[in-house]
Structures are given as C-alpha cells and as structure tokens.
Image: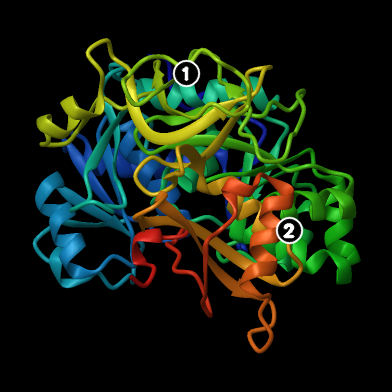
Amino acid sequence: MSSLFPALTDDPSGRVALRFGERSLTYAELAAAAGAVGERVRGVGRVAVWATPSLETAVGVVGVLLAGAAAVPLNPKSGEKELGHILGDSAPGAVLAAPGDELPAPLAGVERVDVDVHAAGTLSAEPVDDEAPALVVYTSGTTGPPKGAVIPRRAVATTLDALADAWQWTGEDVLVHGLPLFHVHGLVLGVLGPLRRGGALRHLGRFGTEGVARELNSGASMLFGVPTMYHRVAEALPDDPELVKALSGARLLVSGSAALPVHDHERIAAATGRRVIERYGMTETLMNTSVRADGEARAGTVGVPLPGVELRLVDEEGAAVTSYDGETVGEIQVRGPNLFTEYLNRPDATAAAFTADGWFRTGDVAVRDPDGYVRIVGRKATDLIKSGGYKIGAGEIENALLEHPGVREAAVTGEPDADLGERIVAWVVPVDPQSPPAEGALADHVARRLAPHKRPRVVRYLDALPRNDMGKIMKRALPS
C-alpha cells in the first residue's frame, strides 16, 4: 500500500500539520518525531497509546503506523477493571505516553516509551500490507466487556478517501475540533484525516464555543463535533456575534457519533445560514454514509452511502427491505473495504457479527427516503419499539419532544405493556424543573407532529440524562 500520509515525505513548505493549544508541529517536524517513535516500536505487534488530547498522542499513533504496528488507544478515564481487561486482551508490547503523564497501576508491567515531539528520527520506507492491523479500538461494552475491533490499514485509507470525495476535503482545509482521541471520530477522522489530505488540525484540547469562534475566524475551514457540542453552539449563538460569524464562514460543519436533534439543526441554520451535515459510522465499520458537501443537508438524515460502501436494510426475518418510503424500518447492514477484520480473540463474536454472505450487522435501525437518504431511528436493542402492532423508532419521537419549548433533553424507550406489547416512555429533562410541561401536553405535542400511535404513554422527569464520553445517551443506565 502507498503511504497513509504522503505529505510526511513530500511537503517541503514548512506547513503546520498539528496544533494543540500553543504547541504545533510542521509536517517535517511530525515526520521526524513520528519516525523516532517508529524506530522505538518497530517489531512490536501492538502498541498501547495513552490517548490524552495532546501532540504526543497524535505523534505516537502516527509513529506506530509508520512502524507497521497496530495502535491500541487507551481512554485515560477508563477504570482499572476495564483497563485491565483491554491490556490483558490486546497484550501490548509497549505503551506510549507524554513525558510526565502518570499511568495507572494496570500499566505498570508494560514497557513505557515517552513520546518526544522534538525528536529527530527517520521515516521507514518499508511497505506494509493493506490488511495489516492499523488500530485495535475497544467498543463501549454495553453488553459485556469491551471487544477490540481490529481495523486494518485498508479500512483507514478507504474511509478517509471516501470522505474526501463526499466532503471535497483537500490539503487546503484546516480542521478544528475538541474530540477525545481514543475513539474513531476524534482519532481516525479528526487526526489521521487531515494528515492524509496534507491539511492541518487545530485541536482545542477542551471543547468550548470561544475556541471554536477563535479558530474558525482565523483560518480554520471545518468543524467536527458531537451533538452535545453543537447543542452548546446553538445555545450560545444568540448572544455571541463572533460565533455567528465563525460558523457562517466555515466551509463544512460536521456532526457525528449520535443523532443531532432537528431543533439544534434549525437553530444553527437560522442564526448562521449554514447547515450542519451528519454522517454515520461505527468503530467496526469506520464511516458508512454521509450527507455530501454538494448535496442537501437535510436535518435528521445521515445522507447516502459513501463510495465503495454497500448498504441495505433488512427486516426481522433477514429479508431485504426494498421500500424506500421513509417509513419502513429495517436493520442497517453494510459491506465494503471500510470494515474491520475481526474482534480480537473473539471468533465467536466475529462470526455472529456477519451474515453468511459477508454483510456486517450494525444493530442500528433506519428508514430510507425515496432518494436513498438514510434516516437512523435508533438501536435495534434499545430504540426499536413495537407498540400496538407498529414498529416505531425512538429517534423521531425524541426529536419531536425536543421541539417543545419546555423540554431541554429527551430520551425515549419502550417498556412491557399487557395491551400494546410495549408502551412508549419519554424521559424528559425540563427547561424549568419547577414547572415541567404536563404529561398530556407532551403526548399531544408528539401526536400532532408525528402520529397518535407514536405519542408517549408515560413521561418521567429527570435532572439530567446519563451520557458517555461522546455525548451519547446511555439508555441502559436510565432508572428502572
């Protein structure tokens, strides 16, 4: 395979590749520092990376990839039990960290290599096979211990090139984000993406609307975020003309990792004239679909399949859904060069994840509009509600609830009901906890916008919804 990062060897201009706060590296400096890491870890099969939002993490991962090894990004917030499981499962030969980082006890037995961003190593020109592992990224583990998805170099390259096609992403683009670097979103798209294009990344360290405004108003052209971040942007826009100017002038605003509520889409568009585009991916598949930069940024959709990705919906019997009517629900299955190769040490789980003819079962349920746009309605396990003979996606009800002026946050689940099979339950964080909207008013609000059978039968009020690091609502953690 040709190099994942051609600009490391053919950029004589001294352009900045990475900036984290006040610290930055040009492409030549990144090549030298990553080359030094590569020299230290060559021959090590898997290398753990203590994935703080720092230059060291980016240099470390690039160095591991240059050495032909596989990086195992570690979440610095992981508990010792989870960390112990990941280390036992992946058996890394070394762990990369920034000098001075304090590593927890489970890492005590792993050889530590400090990343020196000012080191002067040399790049290796040794070819690496397309199918060689690039990353082992551990899933969130909602149904047991996290599983390590082995992502080959082929998947990284094809996904980033497909996104370049969809988003018209070039070396002239400067990306800004404040995402963590132990997930696909922040690391593969947010760090490796700009480097593959020969562009630049400005990482905020910690997300804040002030940082977004500063960077977009000083040359950055793209913003990546999760819905929680865009919600904060939407809330801040009415009182922040600099933020309005920044988003209005951006080339591309991209949201991912969870559905962006339609209400926030519309507030941002109304204030800035720019629409946020959404894309859809998973750890195991990298990116599957996206709204294209030259397409319609339709709120509530994740666009069309990316180049090279096959996508289908299947019903509960496994038959393909052929009706693109925006209503018929099916599980998303995908096939293509963007897929992972296996769950590490889990042949049983790997086999169960694929159909006999090679389609990956995502577990996400969706509908398709007549023009092929995909609208995800939730997870098969938690978001597909069977009530009164209907199959209902939780996502559209959540969006409807969020359009009510008295609702700050909303989640929808199903629970057993003797008459309906399942009844729809709305979990609501009210704008004013002292005066929440009445249950009947919320049910009527949903019935008017969607259909009577989609109204919540029960409303439960909370102070906050449980969320993970990426801002996804953890429905399994809702009170029983």
Residue 151, image x and y in percent?
A: 31, 31
Instruction: Say above or below: 203 vs 132.
Output: below
- Marks 2 and 1, how far apart in space? 31 Å
For the point 87% across and 63% down, the residue is 242
- Kindly identify which residue carries mark 1: 311
Q: How many marks do you count on the picture? A: 2
For the point 51% across and 48% down, the residue is 394
- Camera-side residue: 28 or 345? 345
Q: Quadrant of residue 334?
A: top left
- Camera-side residue: 104 or 38? 104
- Kindly identify which residue carries mark 2: 403
Query: Label 1 crowding class (10 Å Cα cut-off): few <14, some 14-19, many 20+?
Result: some
Residue 254, image x and y in percent?
A: 66, 42
SS at circle 2: loop
Query: Label 2 crowding class (10 Å Cα cut-off): few <14, some 14-19, many 20+?
Result: some
For the point 74% across and 68% down, the residue is 210
Q: Which colour scheme appears in the figure?
A: rainbow
Name the residue type under label 2.
Glu
Q: Quadrant of the C terminus?
A: bottom left
Residue 261, image x and y in percent?
A: 65, 52
Residue 338, image x and y in percent?
A: 41, 22
Instruction: Say above or below: 337 vs 447.
Output: above
For the point 51% across and 42% down, the residue is 393
Q: Quadrant of residue 358?
A: top left
SS at circle 1: strand
Tell us which disc is closer to us: 2 or 1.
2
